[in-house]
Amino acid sequence: MKRMGLSPRVIVVAALAAGLLAAAGCKSSGTQETASAETAGAAPVKVMKAVRQTISEKISYTGTLEAWRAINITPEIGGKIARILVDEGQTVAEGQLLAELETESARLQLKQAEAGLAVARANLEDAKRNKERMDRLIRENAISEMQREKVQLGYEAASAQLDQAQAALNLARHALDVSIMKAPFAGVIASRNAEVGDVINPMMGSFSTASGVLSLVDFSRVKITVEAAQDDVARIKRGQPALLKVAYAPGREFSGAVTVVNLAADPATKKFGVEVQVSNPGLVLRPGTFGDVFFEVSSHANAIVVPQRAILENAYVFVVSDGKAYRREVTTGLQNTTLVEILSGLQDGDRVITDGNFGLEDGSPVTVEEGGRP
């Protein structure tokens, strides 16, 4: 029997086919390993798009809030406190009676002055009638010039006595008025500094007009005085809008305006006092607390802006394209606490890396997650 065998040509063809298959397998495996290596080496980043919007440059300072109006209620004359009609924390209206001294003596003096005025008016009326008679008689040559002059002097004396009596009445009324302490404006009683029965005399050193009987404040508006640096004060003007933020009202901004910009610097600090008044709806703002005042000093509309975090060394950013990060040199303009204006180097819509940009090199592979934070 003859044995069947493969020819040398068939064996050569089979060997070549096996070699090609092995080579193809090796090439495929290498490509997968390379792609896997590139994916594994890509840096995770977050991006945000460069957009056009208005950007404002702001400067801020911290100051202490004060009531925009405050006064110590103090009588102009001395005496014993008869009544105090309000307590600390009480809201009062303009003109409301707050306290009063004992007024019996002042009322008696007022009655005395009123009576004196009535007497003076009667005397003047009598002197006037006498003068009219004397004027008629002098025309008839019935009396001497000396008699006429005497009557004239009596009339002038009665007129002066009336003026004196009127002044005495006004003084008595004033003494009674200042014994009664009323609110000069609507506000809140901040403190009660005396008690019923206390004897006070504003003219003596034992009583301090700095404390008064009561302290009244109006904080329907508040004022904040800050110390501005020389470079900043030139950009702050009277009437300029300002915003106030306080820690105990998170998320809220209170609108106000600059009311005072000192022209001279403090000799010790070399800074300029700037006062801002802010409306206080609902009396949320409390005098004596701290607040941050923001002044908008510049504004550009339709500017290309990116988050502050995207700028590295204030000179360049990384832009993502086709899965890689590319370095872009930029020129910056206005900036605030979160955003920076880009004058050149970026276009509207460029995807700028905001997180994970440190340590990147031009052309580095990256994996992108949208929604980077400013």
Image: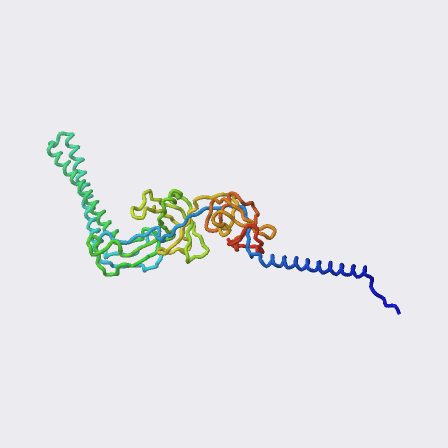
Q: How many marks?
A: 0
Residue drawn 15% across and 30% down?
A: 140
Left or right: 14 in relation to 70: right
Residue drawn 64% across and 59% down?
A: 33
- Place of residue 360 in the rendered image (x, y in percent of width and height, measured from the top left): 53, 53
- Place of residue 334 in the rendered image (x, y in percent of width and height, measured from the top left): 47, 45
Give the position of the N terminus as an image quadrant.
bottom right
Q: Nearer the viewer, residue 345 or 254?
A: 345
- Residue 262, compared with residue 65, is above or below; it is above
- Place of residue 176 in the rendered image (x, y in percent of width and height, measured from the top left): 24, 52
Residue drawn 17% across and 33% down?
A: 135
- Place of residue 117 in the rendered image (x, y in percent of width and height, measured from the top left): 20, 46
Residue furthest to the right in view is 1
Quarter-wise, where is residue 22 in the image?
A: bottom right
Residue drawn 34% across and 46% down?
A: 271
Residue furthest to the bottom in view is 1
- Residue 75, compared with residue 157, is above or below; it is below
Q: Nearer the viewer, residue 35 or 44?
A: 35
Name the image colouring.
rainbow
Q: Nearer the viewer, residue 46 or 373?
A: 46
